């Protein structure tokens, strides 16, 4: 009898477990879109010092102008902040940092005191890491940590020029670089076939003449015990591709190695308009191959099926120009050369427009002449001396416009904490490149009357909302109501659909938000991501009582 009861119970349990589960509505996984990316850009040397033992290399001990020497920031410091969740809390979906390759060893007198290559744009050896930033292992750990948090890694790359010539850093051989004429920027030729500034040797990226590996590199590699490895890798590359041994293809090989080895997700292309556009097309072709090779070799580390990504720094390009950059005598469509996006130099000025004028303009451009492409908007950067809100008097508004505007957003380190862009005693772009102001966040310093932590929280709320909703940057914008101001964004791709409703400059307290049928339906539960309050649609509206003047509504 006992056995019969046990058997009956087992059959009952099996029967229950085999029944179809109740249908539950699961949120579809949010796809990562570069068109909606929230990119954090930092100068490695200025962000966080994770290892004080690498602060001085190559006897770089000469006294420099203010903020023109190495300050100690490194890969390890960035990795610490990744693991702490700093970027995740900001809703950052891609991390862009200054170039990582070994820099010139000497200092340069730019008329503002001596300057070392702390910024990363003065390459000496494209095959080595700058030891002030860290080791190969520390770089690999940085990429792994970013990917583990779901962030893509955007690597800053330079093909246009080597570092300046110093006593420690001889000029590269004839056939590799030109040292004159200096660019005049009056037409295509005087922008591309020239040196950007005096003493910044311009790589002969347009030449068809083959060249040998520079003697200074051969000597350096031999001293470091890697000559045979580097030469054999180059031989294999040229043999496999059939490319001539011209400067452009050497550098393309060196740059794509970072993809093959570490799984870099994209490039930010430095000085794009100063290099022949077909060079970028060649780089794109090889980068795509390298990315595919890395994915095949590391199937368990692949984040998604996105192609390799490139965003170009075509200085002066703006969204108002649609797809073209005008040199005066020639127009170039850089989107035809592997670039999915261009940095948008218009945004810092357009941010002075009212919300609706700004948002509707950008939506019309991105869903019209720029359909299928994107732009990367910014309010401040490392070399733009005329940013939006240079005095940091409108930090909240700046964050709102940047993070809620159609297109991708670029947060420059310290935008989210009110880091000053005017440093007493600093000259020129040194003002833009001060150390990250962690102490202002720790002490909750007021930035023009607003506590630094309040600025950070504002960026966090908007950044997370953007990261969770592709409609924000990649969707179609429609105004719902002019006053109080509400708009919707809608993004659809196959079975995935995302709709958000946003209100700005609202009264604090109770808000009545109009919701059209088909946007959110009667009885649907919504959440306001700014206040965290949950509400339901009733009679075509949502009633919400919060202490904030912003509403970020979604399912």
Image (spheres, rainbow, N blue to C red):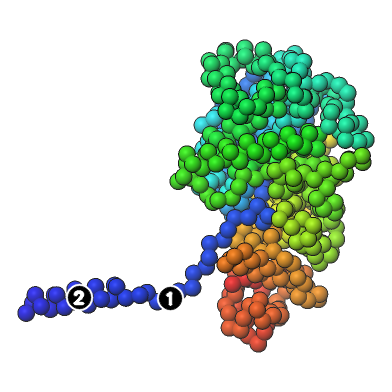
Spot the residue most to the front. 242
Give the vertical position of 220 relative to 394 (above or below): above
- Relative to 352, is 466 on the left or the right? left
Q: Residues within 10 Å of mark 1 (few under 14, many from 20)?
A: few
Report the label total. 2
Q: Quadrant of residue 32?
A: bottom right
Could you tell me residue 6's position as x and y percent? Answer: 13, 75
Q: Quadrant of residue 280?
A: top right
5 or 114, which is in the foreground?
5
Secondary structure beneath disc 1?
A: loop
Could you tell me residue 26's position as x and y percent? Answer: 49, 69
Residue at 63% x, 21% y: name it: 57
Q: Residues within 10 Å of mark 2 (few under 14, many from 20)?
A: few
Could you tell me how far apart the alpha carbons at marks 2 and 1 are, in whole angstroms?
24 Å
Q: Which residue is mark 2?
A: 11
Could you tell me residue 489's position as x and y percent? Answer: 70, 68
Spot the residue most to the left. 1
Secondary structure beneath disc 2?
A: helix
The reply to whether residue 381 is in sight is no
Q: Quadrant of the N terminus?
A: bottom left
438 or 186, which is in the foreground?
186
Q: Quadrant of the C terminus?
A: bottom right
Residue 23 - label: 1
522 or 531, which is in the foreground?
522
Q: Quadrant of residue 339?
A: top right
119 or 430, which is in the foreground?
119
Residue at 66% x, 76% y: name it: 519
Could you tell me residue 257's position as x and y percent? Answer: 58, 31
Query: Which one is earlier in the sequence, the residue at label 2 or at label 1?
Result: 2
Give the vertical position of 446 relative to 119 (above or below): below
């Amino acid at each position: 009898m006992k056995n019969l009861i046990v058997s009956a119970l087992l059959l009952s349990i099996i029967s229950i477990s085999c029944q179809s589960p109740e249908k539950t509505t699961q949120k579809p996984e949010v796809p990562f879109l570069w068109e909606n990316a929230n990119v954090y850009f930092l100068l490695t040397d200025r962000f966080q010092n994770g290892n004080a033992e690498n602060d001085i290399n190559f006897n770089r001990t000469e006294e420099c102008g203010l903020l023109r020497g190495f300050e100690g920031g490194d890969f390890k410091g960035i990795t610490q902040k990744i693991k702490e969740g700093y970027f995740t809390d900001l809703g950052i979906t891609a991390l862009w940092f200054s170039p990582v390759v070994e820099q010139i060893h000497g200092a340069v007198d730019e008329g503002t005191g001596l300057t070392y290559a702390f910024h990363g744009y003065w390459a000496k050896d494209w095959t080595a890491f700058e030891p002030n930033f860290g080791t190969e292992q520390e770089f690999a750990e940085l990429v792994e940590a970013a990917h583990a948090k779901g962030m893509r890694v955007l690597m800053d790359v330079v093909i246009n020029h080597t570092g300046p010539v110093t006593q420690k850093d001889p000029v590269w051989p004839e056939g590799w670089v030109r040292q004159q004429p200096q660019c005049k920027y009056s037409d295509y030729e005087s922008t591309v076939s020239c040196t950007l500034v005096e003493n910044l040797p311009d790589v002969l990226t347009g030449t068809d003449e083959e060249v040998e590996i520079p003697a200074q590199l051969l000597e350096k590699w031999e001293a470091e015990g890697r000559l045979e490895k580097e030469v054999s890798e180059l031989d294999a590359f040229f043999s496999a591709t059939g490319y001539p041994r011209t400067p452009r293809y050497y550098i393309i090989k060196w740059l794509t190695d970072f993809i093959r080895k570490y799984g870099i997700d994209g490039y930010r292309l430095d000085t794009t308009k100063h290099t022949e556009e077909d060079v970028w097309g060649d780089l794109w072709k090889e980068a795509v191959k390298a990315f595919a090779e890395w994915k095949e070799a590391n199937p368990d580390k692949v984040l998604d099926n996105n192609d390799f990504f490139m965003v170009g720094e075509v200085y002066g390009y703006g969204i108002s120009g649609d797809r073209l950059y005008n040199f005066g005598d020639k127009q170039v469509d850089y989107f035809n050369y592997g670039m999915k996006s261009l940095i948008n130099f218009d945004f810092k000025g357009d941010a002075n427009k009212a919300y609706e004028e700004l948002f509707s303009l950008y939506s019309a451009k991105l869903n019209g002449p720029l359909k299928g492409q994107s732009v990367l908007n910014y309010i401040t950067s490392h070399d733009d001396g005329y940013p939006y809100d240079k005095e940091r008097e409108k930090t909240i508004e700046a964050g709102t416009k940047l993070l809620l505007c159609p297109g991708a957003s670029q947060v420059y380190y310290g935008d989210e904490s009110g880091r000053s862009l005017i440093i007493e005693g600093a000259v020129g772009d040194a003002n833009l490149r001060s150390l990250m102001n962690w102490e202002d966040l720790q002490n909750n310093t007021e930035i023009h009357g607003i506590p630094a932590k309040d600025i950070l929280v504002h960026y966090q709320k908007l950044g997370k909302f953007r990261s969770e909703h592709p409609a924000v940057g990649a969707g179609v914008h429609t105004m719902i109501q002019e006053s109080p101001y509400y708009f919707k964004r809608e993004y659809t791709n196959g079975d995935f659909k995302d709709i958000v409703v946003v209100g700005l400059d609202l009264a604090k307290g109770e808000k009545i938000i109009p919701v059209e049928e088909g946007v959110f339906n009667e009885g649907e539960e919504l959440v306001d991501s700014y206040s965290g309050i949950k509400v339901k649609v009733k009679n075509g509206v949502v009633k919400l009582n919060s202490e904030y003047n912003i509403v970020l509504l979604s399912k």
